[in-house]
Amino acid sequence: MHKRTKIIATIGPASKSEAIIHKLYQNGMNVVRVNMSHASTNDLIDISKIVSKLNKKVSSSIGLMLDTQGPEIRTSNFTENIILKTGDLIEVCSVHKKSKNKQLLVENLSYVKGLKVGGKISLDNGQIDLKIKKFSKERILCSVVDSGEITGKKHVNFPGAKLRLPTLTLKDKRDIKKGLELGIDFIALSFARTVKDVKELNSFIEKSKNKPEVFAKIEEQQGMDNIEGISKNCDGLLVARGDLGIETDMTNLPYLQRKMVKVALQNGKKSIVATQLLESMINNPHPTRAEVSDVANAVYEGVDALMLSAETTVGKYPVKCVKYLHDIAKNAERSETLHFENNIKHISDWHTLASTSVKLSKRVKADAIVVLTRSGFTANLISLARPRVPVYAFTNNKETQNKLSVASSLENIFLNFKKDHEKTISEAFNILKNSFNLRGNKKFIVISGVFSDEYADAIQIRFLK
């Protein structure tokens, strides 16, 4: 059975080699993510080179995603871990000063506004909570609520407070500029809070030769409040459950996730679910039953892609994680509730044609849908309906091929289109025979929009013999 849900793997010390990245691809990975909160410019360059090299060998290309650091606040890069015990007093500060209390150095502290006595500070993605006792401009005196150990460069969250840093920072712009030079396919915009945030990024990349798709990462309540407008101004939503579960009520997280995936589908956009999908596999060779159920539920909701973070950057079993994610998704996709033939809004004749092709594939019991597309528009529309059969999307544009790597249901395949329509389809069918091992009397729905000035000029039933 063909896997429809895509897999994004973040590359780090545990996986930053051509051999490992190739194994990740062979086990189901579709997109490589570079997290600029941890990766250097050199890391981005190295990983980009590996992906480019592999894309010359593989049948369905690998996409490359740059994830911005954004306006986040982290602990400073100290070397000795700080042990915190419940009831301890600790000063969260921007610079060291003599004090009888332990001190935790934090970057960008002056940009945090709206603190309150009795408020909460969360460290390391919510692993340790502190309670604010009093504060000044440079330091915050807290008592430790939960014991734990904190290291350098860990997340610091201030639920309920305001962060007066721009969503798109100077560092982000430098990283994106380099990414554009390297030909990145996707940008994940961290801490997207308003429509203005997304429009600023769109404006920044507008003139780039290969404009990447933009995914807005929703990580706090303000972003949720503006979810409709944000969704309409980007290519997709990324459910960043780490910070979102800290900045909002964690017990409400499943509802927020479901809402975001639904909003994305309703607006014709893609969706990605991330954070702690297989967290236990950082150190263990198998996931927990709860993790398996969590991943399956994301698939049931209709998400386009699942994203691994620490599991593949620093975990002991990066390849196994991707294999498990692949198998869980594939099994979950057997559900009959996953198909949304009526999800495509009939905005234009082309939308109607895409919807019709999916319904027709069901009615005639087709084995697959074959799409010939230049921009990816057609293929993305068909993906929205989550068809029951594989969709083989052929394009003569390398950038389009890579961008289709995150959309549900699609196999993204490069093909030099001929002037002769029949020769192009014949070559596409030969690729399906030789590279995808499709044999026998297969029935395909073929939809094409590349041989005239109109969006679409053909929808046919064809047989592969």
Image (spheres, grey):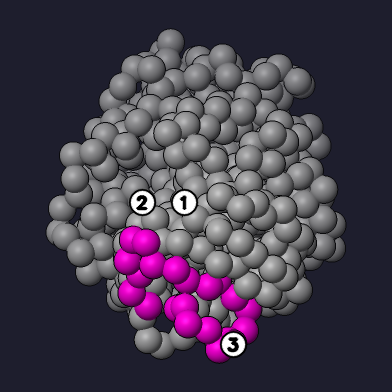
Hey, what amino acid is under mark 1? Gly
Hey, what amino acid is under mark 3? Lys
Residue wearing tag 3: 97
10 Å neighbourhood of mark 2: few (<14), some, or many (≥20)?
many
Q: Tell me if label 1 and label 2 are in contact, CB under 8 Å.
A: yes
Q: Helix or strand or loop: what does disc 1 sit on?
A: helix
Pick the residue in front: 158 or 335.
158
Residue 242 is labelled as 1
Answer whether residue 100 is magenta in the image: yes
Residue 150: image quadrant is: bottom left
Q: Is residue 221 above or below residue 168?
A: above
Q: Residue at x 41, y 88 (%)?
A: 79
Please report whichever mark, 2 or 3, sits nearer to the chain's N-terminal start: 3
Residue wearing tag 2: 276
Pick the residue in front: 183 or 220.
220
Compared across the picture, whether 375 is left or right of 245 comes to right
Please report whichever mark, 1 or 2, sits nearer to the chain's N-terminal start: 1
Q: Helix or strand or loop: what does disc 3 sit on?
A: loop
Pick the residue in front: 346 or 275.
275
**Cα gap from disc 2 to disc 3, whole angstroms:** 36 Å
Q: Helix or strand or loop: what does disc 2 sit on?
A: loop
Q: Tell me if label 2 and label 3 are in contact, CB under 8 Å.
A: no
Single out the residue that lies furthest toward the front: 100
Q: Is residue 287 above or below residue 410?
A: below
Hey, what amino acid is under mark 2? Gln
Of tags 2 and 3, which is closer to the observer? 3
Give the residues in magenta.
82-102
**Cα gap from disc 3 to disc 1, whole angstroms:** 32 Å
Q: Residue at x 41, y 61 (%)?
A: 144
Compared across the picture, whether 458 is left or right of 209 comes to left
Please report whichever mark, 3 or 1, sits nearer to the chain's N-terminal start: 3
Q: Residue at x 53, y 84 (%)?
A: 99
